[in-house]
Image: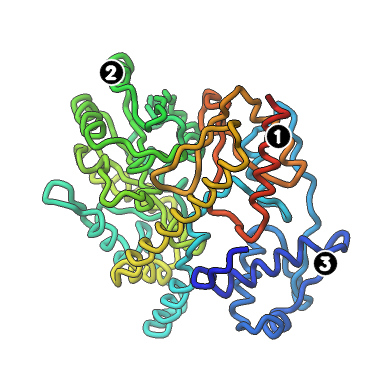
Amino acid sequence: MDSRKDVTFAYQAVYRYLVGLIETTSVKGEQKLPSLRQLAQRLSVSVSTTKYAYALLEDEGRIYARPKLGYFTRSTPAALPNDRSTNLLDSAFFNARQPGMLALCSDAPAMLASLQNPLLMMERELTRQYPGDPAPHYQPLGESELRATLAERYTRSTQCYWQAEHVYIGADLQSVMALSLQALNLQGTLAVVESPCSWAILRQLQAAQIRVIEMPLNEQGRFDLPAFNALLNDEPIRLAVLSSTVNVPQGNLMPAQDKQQICRWLAERDIWLFENDTYGELCFEPEPARYRDFADPEKLLVFSTFDKIIGAEAPYGYVLCRQQPLQFHRLFIERGFRLSPTRQKAIARLFNSRRIDQHLITLRALLQERMQRMKALLEEHGKGRWQVVVPQGGASFWLKATHPVDMRRVFERLLKQRIVIVPGEVFSQQGAWKHHLRLSYTLEWHKDIAQALKQLAQAFDEAR
């Protein structure tokens, strides 16, 4: 068990205690949990801390509240069927959220070091200082203070600059992506994406009826540049979706000269560049080159979210784009996001006080430390079964089986042992990467990860 107290907040300890309490109970069906006050007294924490831990479990669907009776566990639903017709991604994410499952597929870097407590404290302080009207005035494009803060943070030069009017904030990344594609009239067009590619991006493009051409990354995280150029010549590409720094889930960093050349080709052909900055701050290399350093600013859209670095209390997505402001305004107003103005102001204060920058230093160090720990375990239990490449950022390993392995069989076998992985094929619309999988190192390290990897190795042997 990880004994580093400096990276564990009180609510996390209470949350883990409750998870253990739920998982080890012998009671069948629903179970009544201690009241907020009882648990606070038992663990010597505040009632607000226990309330927050219960809220997290409630959001995950593990527990529910009965008025005047307290909190109860939910009966564990049956796992989704895993026959070959079942959508693999849906099955993986459904089962990863069930009680008692060990999710080796986690995608939450802020699990290691969250800014949720400082965020909530800042929000409470702002509420005391500026009580305001009982009914908040929602700003449909996002709170002006946060928009200005993001514009300032992304501005690098007189050529690469942003104003608050170029920034739009929505409830989550999927929402702002959908509105952006609509505002730029890109629905039903043709896009090129790096492969492997985020499943969330692939689903969003599919929802917009955008046909996708996947350009595979090699083991060094680079494109075949002549093939990339030929693709741009041969196909009516309107949109390229590329990772800002590390290519997630692969974890490699493309050289600056490659990015510069790609941006030159895109600009020559008037192709939109959507830069995925979701993991842009989690590159281990200092000051890595980003596509936006070389891109045509008039054909550039940058998108990201706060939850990867702050935590689940900051799920908002945002985009920066100079073009089509009237279309963006109209669509965001029609969508009518009702986002907490105070929460957005609190996020802005975390940036303006440089608290985010200090936090990122800590978070990157923790990610590297956990990455090295996971690498050692993978090498110990792999014994030639898989290829371990050290990622240059992000929160996961991209493993390749050294011999052909049916990853769906591996997935199904581990699921019976209450372990969840994500096979590589979910990161491709065409079902590529069948002999790969993504493994996170932002895990519940108090659990027996070594035993889980031993079971993974056994599943590899049986699926060969």
Instruction: State which mark lies toward you, 3 or 2.
Output: 2
Q: Earlier in the sequence, mark 1 or mark 3?
A: 3
Classify mark 2: helix, strand or loop.
helix
Count neighbours of disc 1 (C-alpha within 10 A) and say few if under 14, some if 14 to 19, many if 20 or more: many
Would you say the residues marked 1 and 2 are in contact, meaning their CB atoms lie under 8 Å apart? no
Q: Nearer the viewer, residue 463 or 233?
A: 463
Labelled disc at residue 459? 1
Q: Is residue 125 visible?
A: yes
* Kind of residue at badge 3: Gln
Residue 265: horizontal and vertical position, in percent? 22, 26
Q: Which residue is mark 2?
A: 226
Q: CA distance from mark 3 to mark 2?
A: 61 Å
Q: Residue at x 50, y 68 (%)?
A: 7
- The kind of residue tagged 2 is Pro
Q: Secondary structure at mark 1?
A: helix
Q: What residue sits right under mark 3 in the picture?
A: 31
Q: CA distance from mark 1 to mark 2?
A: 39 Å
Specify the amino acid type for callout 1: Ala
Q: Quadrant of residue 197?
A: top left
Q: Which mark is residue 12?
A: none
